[in-house]
Image (cartoon, helix red, strand yellow):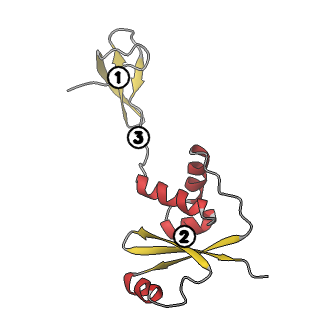
Amino acid sequence: MKYPICPRCKSENASKSGVINGRQRFKCKQCSYYFTVAKLGKQIDSYLVVKALQLYIEGVSYREIERILGVSHVSVMNWVKKYNVKPPLSADYRPTYKVLNHNELNNMVTSPDFLKGAGMILTELGDKYMMIKWERFRE
């Protein structure tokens, strides 16, 4: 069995030395340092991180991203800070979005007036599709 590396001296020469708070404790044979292995946190799929940041850039609020993707709005805020993402400043356009299944998307795209006066992006969202559309503000 391979034991973890000592965080103090980086030695691979360690032995088990009991259990503390349900975690295995080790003792380094080189420097006599006691340590436990770092607990790994829950890993979020990078696909969700990218989708959340895309939605944020498009102007969707944190809470709406939470409702759409099922990821905490606090996590989205942390990702925005971590990756230093800033939404573009634009007062002329506002994004609207819809989550559609395949049939709804087909019906919408085949409509002749669908793209007039707007830009659009389609993205896959699990087994559904998200349509983000920019329309000019009407005065």
Marks 3/2: CA–CA distance: 26 Å
The amino acid on which the numbered mark 1 sits, given as a three-letter code, is Phe
Name the secondary structure under disc 3: loop
**Looking at the image, do the residues carrying marks 3 and 2 touch, with CB atoms under 8 Å apart?**
no
Write the residue at 40% across / 75% down: 128
Marks 3/1: CA–CA distance: 17 Å
Write the residue at 60% across / 59% down: 57
Marks 2/1: CA–CA distance: 43 Å
**Residue 21 x %, y %:** 42, 36
Considering the image in quadrants, where does the C terminus appear? bottom right
Would you call the spot at circle 2 few (<14 residues within 10 Å), some (14-19), or many (20 or more)? few
Q: Nearer the viewer, mark 2 or mark 1?
A: 2
Write the residue at 71% across / 63% down: 90
The mark total stands at 3
Q: Nearer the viewer, mark 3 or mark 1?
A: 3
Residue 127, above or below 7: below
Mark found first going from the N terminus, 3 or 1 = 1
Nearer to the camera, 138 or 74:
138
The amino acid on which the numbered mark 3 sits, given as a three-letter code, is Leu
**Looking at the image, do the residues carrying marks 3 and 1 touch, with CB atoms under 8 Å apart?**
no
Residue that numbered label 1 is attached to: 26
**Residue 132 x %, y %:** 54, 73
The amino acid on which the numbered mark 2 sits, given as a three-letter code, is Arg
Residue that numbered label 3 is attached to: 40
Mark found first going from the N terminus, 2 or 1 = 1
Residue that numbered label 2 is attached to: 67
Nearer to the camera, 35 or 126:
126
